[in-house]
Amino acid sequence: MPHWLQLMAESLPSLLWAGLIFTIPLTLLSFVFGLLLGLITAIARLFGPAPVAAIARFYVWVIRGTPLLVQLFVIFYGLPSIGILLDAFPAALIGFTLNIGAYSSEIIRAVISSVPKGQWEAAYSIGMSWRQAMSRTILPQAARVAVPPLSNTFISLVKDTSLAAAITVPELFQAAQRIVATTYEPLILYIEAALLYLVLSSVLSQLQVRLERRFARYGGMLEANA
């Protein structure tokens, strides 16, 4: 067996384990919490009172206007200077959640705004409250439009979690770095890590296609019943 292939085979379990224990949980938790934060932020910007909407806009402006790596460094290395100490994984989770929340809020805000005004009027005409109209009429229609951009955000997040290595989270990329430090084979190990990210992203892309098709059929059913 060639040396490079043997090295890849020997390091694969460690990389997979790091991905299973840290990369995947960090991705899923960050996306779920970020999506909830994005929904709250989008609703605050669209329907909240002026001060709340201003705070939401400021949050989105700051997060979208600064690099994710800098945000992680501020949370993990900067906050201890004012007495706030966080372990690496919670710091990464907070950083990615804030980042996803800002970007997803813009997607959610756009798709909610794209729902025709007549849908609100129709919901109110049958006695729905604002909350009922939002949850039963507006959000289901907006979700169909939001699936492609949110899926792309999720796939990007999988790759962005490699930045957590910079704040000592032992995820997939840092696992590769640690093996490199002992084997002195950076090219082979970093290519292997890249291939693992590529496989994971490809699987998620295929799931995205299936999800989009399912929502497209659902949308066709709604239009047929309209």
Image (tube, helix red, strand yellow):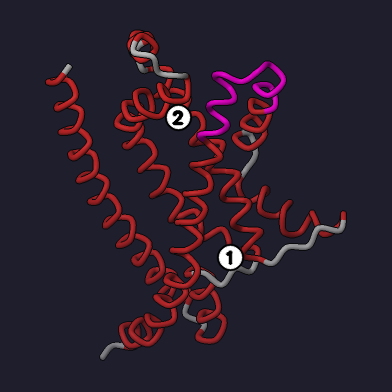
Q: Is 137 in front, or is 18?
A: 137
Q: Secondary structure at mark 1?
A: helix
In which quadrant of the rendered image does the N terminus lie? bottom left
x and y, in percent, of residue 113 in the image: 43, 17
Q: Residue at x 31, y 26 (%)?
A: 141
Residue 50 colored magenta? yes
x and y, in percent, of residue 5 in the image: 30, 83
Query: Dominant secondary structure of the magenta stretch?
Result: helix
Amino acid at pointer 2: Ile
The answer to whether residue 132 is above or below residue 63 is above
The answer to whether residue 131 is above or below residue 12 is above
Question: Range of the magenta residues?
Answer: 39-55
Residue at the spot of label 1: 165
Q: Residue at x 86, y 58 (%)?
A: 83
What number of labels is visible? 2
The answer to whether residue 208 is above or below residue 76 is above
Residue at the spot of label 2: 108
x and y, in percent, of residue 103 in the image: 52, 36
